[in-house]
Image (cartoon, grey):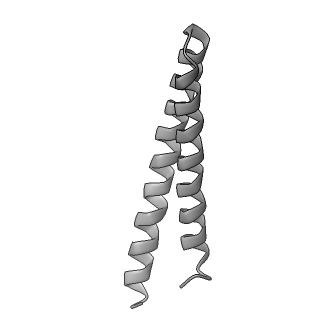
Amino acid sequence: MTDDPLLIAALVACAAVLIILLLGINSFRKGGQEASKESNKFMRWRLAAQFVAILLILAFVYFRRQSGG
């Protein structure tokens, strides 16, 4: 199961979501007008990355069930 490329892609996408989330929180922590804009940008990126991660997880589950594994 760990050699499945779809699972690896889903795990990488989840890690990307976590990294983007941490960057956004760090930017929010700094405070100020510019940091607020940067934080909002990171959170929009997080939503897109999270959407991709969810699609990859759903695809993994779907194809895993189709193959009987």
The residue lying at 57 percent from left, 55 percent from top is 15
The residue lying at 58 percent from left, 31 percent from top is 26
Q: Position of residue 39 (x, y in %)?
A: 54, 24
In the image, residue 69 sits, relative to residue 24, either above or below, namely: below
In the image, residue 2 sits, relative to residue 53, either above or below, namely: below
User: Between residues 11 and 58, which one lies in front from this camera angle?
Assistant: 11
Residue furthest to the bottom: 68
Q: Position of residue 12 (x, y in %)?
A: 60, 60
Residue furthest to the top: 33
In the image, residue 40 sits, relative to residue 46, either above or below, namely: above
Total tally of numbered discs in the picture: 0
Q: Is residue 65 left or right of residue 60?
A: left
The residue lying at 49 percent from left, 55 percent from top is 53
User: Between residues 38 and 69, which one lies in front from this camera angle?
Assistant: 38
The residue lying at 45 percent from left, 67 percent from top is 59
Q: Is residue 3 left or right of residue 46?
A: right
User: Between residues 60 and 28, which one lies in front from this camera angle?
Assistant: 28
Q: Is residue 14 left or right of residue 34?
A: left
In the image, residue 25 sits, relative to residue 53, either above or below, namely: above
Q: Which quarter of the figure has residue 6? A: bottom right
Q: Which quarter of the figure has residue 20? A: top right
Q: Position of residue 5 (x, y in %)?
A: 61, 74
Q: Quadrant of the C terminus?
A: bottom left
